[in-house]
């Protein structure tokens, strides 16, 4: 998240109390608190690769977030998620148990009938979790996102992705067919009218092949994946309570990233239109219009699982449907995330994340 990932960055030492209330949601990892002592994003900073593929320990929160829309040879649809979050107690790094860096991993596989979820938590400085920019590697325990690029290519151009849990696992290969894409104003992504922001870029052009391991056996899959990279120190305003985030692969080859951060009014929206060859166009404020179409009872609450997504200036008007209404991430900070399909002015597939419900 993208914006989507911001609220899920975490503080392990206070996790139990933070999960107790909506007020905790705002305070989680400093989402609604001051960024005192940490660096804050500023407009005009160019990305520096491969260094920016690695951690930025002077910022409070950061993530490496991948979602994949997958298909078996018989046409059955699946979704997979792999995420590594970093959260800092202080704006520095150190070795051993004195490290202030905290890490959390989420992995999930979604089918039309089931949603499998696992979580890993680690303290930094002891080798259990971390990220190296070159050669690229991100890991927590035996979960790994590893670069396999050729010399001279971007470190994220070729990846292997693995995760295992009691009921599921996956082993995927990803090959980028397009460029990295900056979100917002050349990578400076506003999150509120009050100026909260993050640095944010994506790789939305992965072709995927590999296998899923499910209770009924292994399944060969192919598909498309989207990686989000984001870091910040104070990405939410004090009156923001959650968000709805979409990453869409259009059948035309174009891509769309869009989100709404909810508050007491109409909320704050942002969107980027990406051409099939990877040229991004940040859309004007409020260009994105989203409205719930259908709700479902999920984890004891009503959640909007089907949405109308419009960009009137581009004639874009689609309705999304989830592969599985019950794509609930029952993790330390719970949220909804799963694969979706959409139809209307154009069709395609993508992912939806919703927090704060």
Image (spheres, helix red, strand yellow):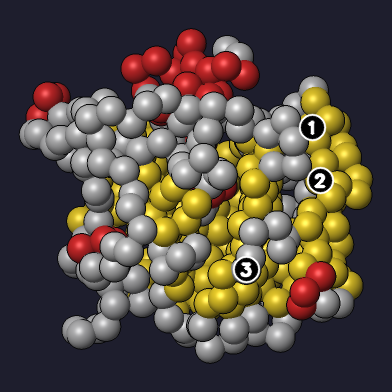
The answer to whether 163 appears left or right of 272 in the picture is left
Question: Badge 3 is on which residue?
Answer: 283
Q: Position of residue 109 (x, y in %)?
A: 61, 50
Rounded to the nearest whole Å, what is the CA distance between mark 3 and mark 1?
32 Å
Question: Badge 1 is on which residue?
Answer: 298
Q: Position of residue 287 (x, y in %)?
A: 71, 63
Say which of 30 and 249 sits in front: 30
Instruction: Assess disc 1: are there few (<14), some (14-19) or many (≥20) residues with their C-alpha within 10 Å of its C-alpha.
Output: some
Q: Position of residue 44 (x, y in %)?
A: 32, 64
Residue 113 in sight from this viewpoint: no
Q: Nearer the viewer, mark 3 or mark 1?
A: 3
State yes or no: discs 1 and 2 in contact (Cβ < 8 Å): yes
Residue 318 in sight from this viewpoint: yes
Question: Badge 2 is on which residue?
Answer: 305
Rounded to the nearest whole Å, what is the CA distance between mark 1 and mark 2?
9 Å
Q: Secondary structure at mark 1?
A: strand
Instruction: Assess disc 2: are there few (<14), some (14-19) or many (≥20) residues with their C-alpha within 10 Å of its C-alpha.
Output: many
Say which of 74 and 340 sits in front: 340
Tell which circle, 1 or 2, labels the residue nearer the N-terminal end.
Answer: 1
């Amino acid at each position: 998240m993208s914006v989507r990932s911001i609220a899920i960055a975490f503080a392990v030492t206070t996790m139990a109390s933070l999960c107790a209330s909506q007020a905790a949601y705002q305070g989680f990892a400093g989402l609604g608190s001051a960024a005192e002592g940490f660096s804050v994003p500023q407009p005009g900073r160019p990305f520096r690769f491969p260094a920016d593929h690695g951690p930025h320990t002077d910022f409070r929160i950061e993530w490496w977030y991948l979602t994949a829309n997958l298909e078996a040879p018989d046409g059955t649809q699946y979704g997979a998620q792999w995420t590594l979050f970093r959260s800092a107690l202080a704006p520095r790094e150190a070795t051993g148990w004195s490290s202030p860096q905290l890490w959390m991993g989420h992995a999930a596989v979604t089918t039309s009938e089931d949603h499998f979820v696992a979580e890993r938590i680690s303290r930094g400085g002891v080798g259990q979790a971390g990220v190296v920019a070159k050669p690229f590697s991100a890991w927590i325990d035996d979960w790994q996102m590893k670069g396999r690029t050729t010399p001279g290519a971007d470190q994220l151009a070729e990846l292997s992705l693995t995760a295992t849990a009691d009921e599921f696992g996956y082993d995927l290969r990803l090959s980028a067919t397009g460029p990295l894409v900056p979100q917002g104003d050349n990578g400076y992504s506003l999150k509120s009218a009050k100026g909260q922001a993050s640095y944010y870029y994506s790789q939305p052009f992965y072709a995927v092949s590999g296998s899923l391991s499910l209770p009924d056996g292994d399944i060969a899959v192919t598909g498309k994946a989207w990686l989000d990279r984001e870091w910040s120190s104070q990405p939410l305003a004090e009156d923001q309570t959650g968000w709805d985030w979409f990453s869409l692969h259009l059948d035309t080859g174009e891509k769309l990233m869009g989100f709404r951060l909810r508050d007491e009014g109409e909320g704050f929206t942002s969107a980027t239109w990406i051409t099939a060859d990877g040229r991004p166009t940040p859309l004007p404020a409020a260009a994105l219009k989203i409205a719930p179409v259908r709700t479902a009872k999920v984890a004891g609450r009503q959640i909007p699982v089907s949405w109308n997504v419009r960009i009137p200036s581009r004639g874009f008007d689609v309705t999304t449907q989830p592969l599985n209404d019950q794509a609930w991430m029952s993790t330390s900070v719970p949220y909804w995330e799963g694969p979706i399909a959409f139809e209307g002015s154009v069709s395609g597939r993508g992912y939806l994340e919703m927090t704060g419900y």
